[in-house]
Structures are given as structure tokens and as C-alpha cells.
Amino acid sequence: MQDRAEFRVSVEKDYLVFASAHFITFAGHRCEALHGHNYRARVTVEGALNQESWFVFDFVELKKIMRRLCDEIDHLVLLPLESPRIQVVEDGERVNVSVDGKLRYVFPRRDCALLPIPNTTVEMLARMLASRLQRELYTQGARGLTAIEMEVEENFGQSAVYRVTLNVPS
Ligand SMILES: [Zn+2]
């Protein structure tokens, strides 16, 4: 019987940041005012060694994908499309944002990132980035990956980590 061994590769780079605006809702009727963060992403991918290349996944490709995912939401207002309390409605070149049914903001559409999440917390941003990364990795033919761990930091020393275990095709 063979020992089960896995490797972890991590990427944390100065350019894996996104400076974005957001506001979140809390339980009850509380809701933040619009503000911004210099978010930072950090990713770890776990899995078996690729027997031809002797790596888990190509660092160059992993960095490229992560940079693209961060660039997609950089310098934008992050808005949740699945919030029960925040209504985001596209209206031509504008996006109307209501909270609890009352219009609160109107943004230019090009300055917004409409995201498939219920609230723009670091937890939900980490989960969203992890699932986007997972899709990209599979598209690029990654095999043998067993887990993705995505960390998103919104302030120095204040972050959330999302970890997803992947089913390895047998
Ligand atoms: Zn915030």
C-alpha cells in the first residue's frame, strides 16, 4: 500500500489586490455606509504532483488567473445580486441600488461589479473567488487537485478563509 502524500502551493503577491467600494447589511435593519478597502487575496492549492511536470499546478498560470480575477473587480463598487435586502437593478447605463425597498445609490454601470453573492463580506468574496478559480483550473486541465483555500483580507490582520475540498476524478 502506498502512502498518501499531497503538496500545497501558495500564491501571495503584491499585485493580488483589489481596491473596491462596498457596503454590507447586518442582521436586523443595520446597513453600512458605502466605503472602500484595499482587499488582498491569497490562495493555496493542494493536490497530487503532476507526474510529468513534478508540480501541483503551474505557478505562472496560477498567478495569471488570480491576477485576472482580482483585476475583474478592482476599482469598482461591489454589489451583491443575491441579497434579500439589497436590490440591484440595471437601468441602461445606470445601476439603481435600493436597501429595504428605498433607493439609496445610483452608480454608473461601468463602475459596478454585480456579483452572484448574498452580501459583500470577505467570506462571500473568498468563496466567490475560490469557485471562479476552480472553474479556471479545470478549464486549463488541472488534475489531481484536492483543495482550494482562498483568503481575502479587507484590513490589515482582518481576513476570512474559505476552503473547499475537491472531488478527485478517479
Ligand atoms: Zn467594508
Image (cartoon, rainbow, N blue to C red):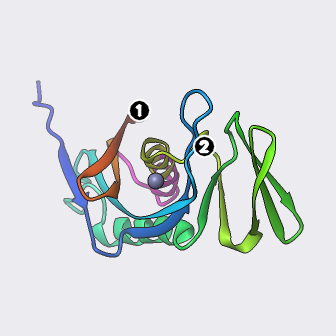
Residue behind mark 2? 117
Residue lying farthest to the right in this orientation: 92
The percent position of residue 106, horizontal first and vertical second, equals 77, 63
Per the image, is 141 magenta?
yes
Displayed quadrant of residue 95: bottom right
Query: In the displayed structure, does residue 40 sit left or right of residue 110?
Result: left
**Mark 2 near ligand 1 (CB under 8 Å)?**
no
Location of the C terminus (image quadrant): top left
Whether residue 52 is visible, yes or no, is: no
The residue depicted at 24 percent of the width and 45 percent of the height is: 48
For the residue pair 40 and 38, the one nearer the viewer reads as 38
The three-letter amino acid code for the residue at tag 1 is Asn
Displayed quadrant of residue 76: bottom right
The residue depicted at 11 percent of the width and 24 percent of the height is: 1
Displayed quadrant of residue 85: top right
The percent position of residue 139, horizontal first and vertical second, equals 52, 57
Residue behind mark 1? 167
The percent position of residue 165, horizontal first and vertical second, equals 36, 34
For the residue pair 104 and 13, the one nearer the viewer reads as 104
Label 2: state its secondary structure: loop
The three-letter amino acid code for the residue at tag 2 is Ile
Marker disc for residue 33: none
The residue depicted at 84 percent of the width and 72 percent of the height is: 93
Real-space CA distance between mark 2 and mark 1, rounded to the nearest whole angstrom: 23 Å
Label 1: state its secondary structure: loop
**Mark 1 near ligand 1 (CB under 8 Å)?**
no
For the residue pair 7 and 49, the one nearer the viewer reads as 7
Numbered range of the magenta stretch: 131-146
Q: Earlier in the sequence, mark 2 or mark 1?
A: 2
- Mark 2, mark 1: which one is toward the viewer? 2
The percent position of residue 134, horizontal first and vertical second, equals 46, 49
Other residues around mark 2 within 10 Å, as few (<14) / some (14–19) / many (≥20): some
